[in-house]
């Protein structure tokens, strides 16, 4: 095996191994992961929350045993593949082995460690952004139109994974118009690539049309509940944190596009970056939406620094950028990764701002990884004591509760439901409902409409973990319904009033 391939393999292996080491064992899976895993049991061309590709990966995980190892493997794999694509970008730019090592180090010790620790669409999203830029770079280098088709395919995979990839295209197209690459708009191959991409994503577009475009409803909910709390300056500040330890490489990448003659054909990438960032700022996007912009500039920066640090006395300075990356990343470990227990973070006294705009003792992502096994265990305990289990209905306030119960339950046939997100389409109401195990968020316990439908209401437990986002979530046993509950719920679902 050549030295270059051995080093690349080592980085890929290190990346995957690290993703299993950056989460303290006290934490459960994260809230969103449970929804994605449940989608494997309800395959479709679209969902209310995300496009369909994640469900296909979840189906593979399900076939492999649905274990923690496989849940964490795929985001780790996508992170490793991002390193591979950027490595190949460096090689296509005639970069040295040193430049390859520098980019791999920068990517390994960056915010991608945080992104790739969770089974969410974000890991594949970053990979697809990087693939789009890589395939376009290869097209510029070779003028082989097959690279445009690869680019369209990369976009389609990204679109079927997360709609965020659309912003990559919205930044790239005006950049093409403002550079010499505008001649592409006169080439039939450009439109063939466009048609290919459209054909690949069309099943999801058709699904959206058939379901009255739930993506827009989801975006509206996101705007009203989360993005409303986003401060534009916070978005800008966060951009410096994602690759803080390797800022010197990214800045070198930006500079190289205007000062290093071999990189002149790629200047449109800086324009694309500018347009995309401006669009994100205007729309008050979350900071991490833009992470996919940066890996490709690490490639340019590493090649440029390698050029500046040519053999001679300067070669002794080549270790400096790598040392800077490693030294600057160490202080970020506690801030970005759940390496310690929640109690340790609480004692540190640092506050964290959540999506609700309020301050909390630990990160929201960390809080979303607590209390789930406790909830599932308590539901199992209640369920075991109930007679006529075929008439028991487990109703949760949110998808995290339902998904966590379904993932951790030890009882065959037990299934939790919710009238939120995708679960509203999966709930089976064609049966008798005599008993309900009601899971209610602490802030929702004041709502008593569901209680009025039963003769007996008993509080039977709550989530005790004080650091969990679900702290004080109530477990309530409702029995002896006053009417045909399933019929009522079917009527309300048909009228769109199910909640």
Image: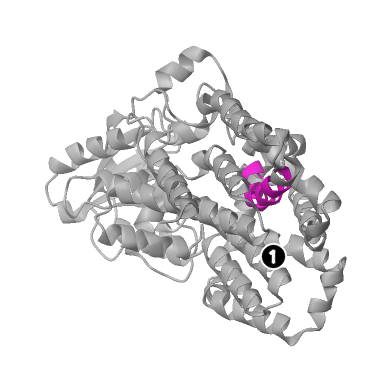
- Place of residue 342 in the rendered image (x, y in percent of width and height, measured from the top left): 42, 22
On the rendered structure, is 136 left or right of 181? left
31 horizontally vs 168: left or right: left
Residue 398 appears in the rendering: no
Q: Residue at x 80, y 53 (%)?
A: 257
165 to 442, vertically: above or below: below
Which of the 4 quarters of the picture holds residue 181? bottom right
Q: How many marks?
A: 1
Q: How was this image coloured? A: one colour
Q: Say above or below: 24 vs 185.
A: above
Q: For the residue labelled by badge 1, is the local secondary structure a helix, a strand or a loop?
A: helix
Residue 35 in magenta? Answer: no
Viewer-closest of 149 and 423: 149
Q: Is residue 183 above or below residue 188?
A: above
Residue at x 11% of width, y 47% of height: 387
Quadrant location of the N terminus?
bottom left
Q: Is residue 166 left or right of residue 439?
A: right
Residue named by callout 1: 137
Quarter of the image for residue 26 reads top left
Q: Quadrant of residue 486?
A: bottom left
Give the magenta part as a residue range. Answer: 286-305
- Measured as percent of width and height from the top left, residue 371 is found at 35, 32
Residue situated in front as seen by the camera: 378 or 90: 90
Comparing 338 with 485, the one in front is 338
Left/right placement of residue 216 relative to residue 401 reads right
Looking at the picture, how far across and down is residue 266, in whole percent? Answer: 77, 60
User: Can I make out residue 308 in this image?
Assistant: yes
- Residue at image point 80% right, 63% down: 265
Q: Main secondary structure of the magenta part?
A: helix
């Amino acid at each position: 095996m050549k030295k270059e391939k051995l080093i690349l393999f080592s980085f890929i292996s290190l990346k995957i191994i690290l993703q299993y080491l950056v989460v303290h064992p006290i934490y459960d899976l994260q809230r969103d992961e449970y929804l994605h895993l449940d989608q494997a049991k309800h395959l479709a061309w679209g969902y209310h929350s995300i496009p369909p590709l994640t469900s296909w990966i979840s189906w593979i995980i399900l076939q492999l045993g649905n274990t923690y190892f496989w849940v964490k493997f795929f985001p780790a794999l996508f992170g490793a593949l991002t390193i591979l694509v950027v490595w190949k970008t460096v090689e296509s730019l005639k970069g040295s082995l040193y430049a390859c090592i520098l980019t791999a180090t920068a990517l390994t010790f960056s915010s991608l460690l945080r992104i790739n620790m969770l089974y969410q669409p974000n890991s594949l999203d970053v990979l697809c952004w990087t693939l789009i830029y890589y395939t376009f770079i290869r097209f510029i280098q070779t003028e082989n139109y097959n690279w445009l088709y690869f680019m369209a395919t990369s976009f389609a995979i990204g679109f079927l994974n997360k709609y965020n990839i659309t912003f990559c295209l919205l930044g790239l197209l005006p950049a093409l118009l403002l550079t010499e690459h505008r001649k592409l708009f006169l080439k039939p191959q450009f439109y063939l690539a466009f048609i290919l991409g459209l054909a690949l994503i069309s099943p999801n577009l058709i699904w959206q049309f058939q379901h009255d475009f739930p993506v827009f409803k989801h975006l509206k909910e996101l705007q009203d509940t989360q993005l409303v709390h986003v401060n534009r300056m916070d978005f800008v500040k966060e951009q410096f944190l994602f690759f803080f330890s390797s800022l010197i490489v990214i800045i070198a990448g930006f500079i190289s596009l205007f000062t290093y003659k071999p990189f002149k054909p790629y200047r449109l990438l800086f324009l694309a970056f500018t347009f995309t960032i401006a669009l994100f700022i205007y729309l008050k996007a979350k900071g991490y939406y833009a992470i996919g912009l940066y890996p490709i500039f690490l490639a340019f920066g590493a090649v440029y620094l390698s050029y500046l640090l040519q053999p001679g006395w300067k070669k002794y300075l080549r270790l400096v950028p790598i040392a800077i990356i490693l030294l600057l990343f160490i202080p970020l470990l506690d801030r970005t990764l759940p390496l310690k227990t929640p109690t340790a973070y609480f004692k540190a006294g640092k506050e964290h701002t959540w999506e609700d705009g309020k301050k909390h003792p630990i990160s929201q992502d960390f809080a979303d990884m607590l209390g789930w096994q406790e909830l599932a265990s308590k539901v199992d305990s209640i369920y075991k004591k109930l007679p006529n289990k075929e008439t028991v209905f487990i109703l949760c306030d949110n998808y995290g509760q339902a998904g966590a119960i379904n993932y951790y339950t030890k009882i065959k046939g037990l299934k939790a439901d919710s009238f939120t997100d995708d679960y509203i389409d999966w709930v089976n109401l064609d049966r008798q409902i005599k008993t309900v195990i009601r899971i209610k968020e602490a802030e929702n316990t004041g709502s008593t409409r569901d209680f009025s439908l039963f003769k007996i209401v008993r509080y039977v437990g709550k989530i005790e973990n004080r650091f969990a986002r679900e702290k004080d979530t109530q477990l309530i046993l409702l029995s002896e319904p006053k009417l045909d509950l399933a019929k009522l719920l079917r009527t309300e679902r048909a009228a769109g009033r199910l909640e």
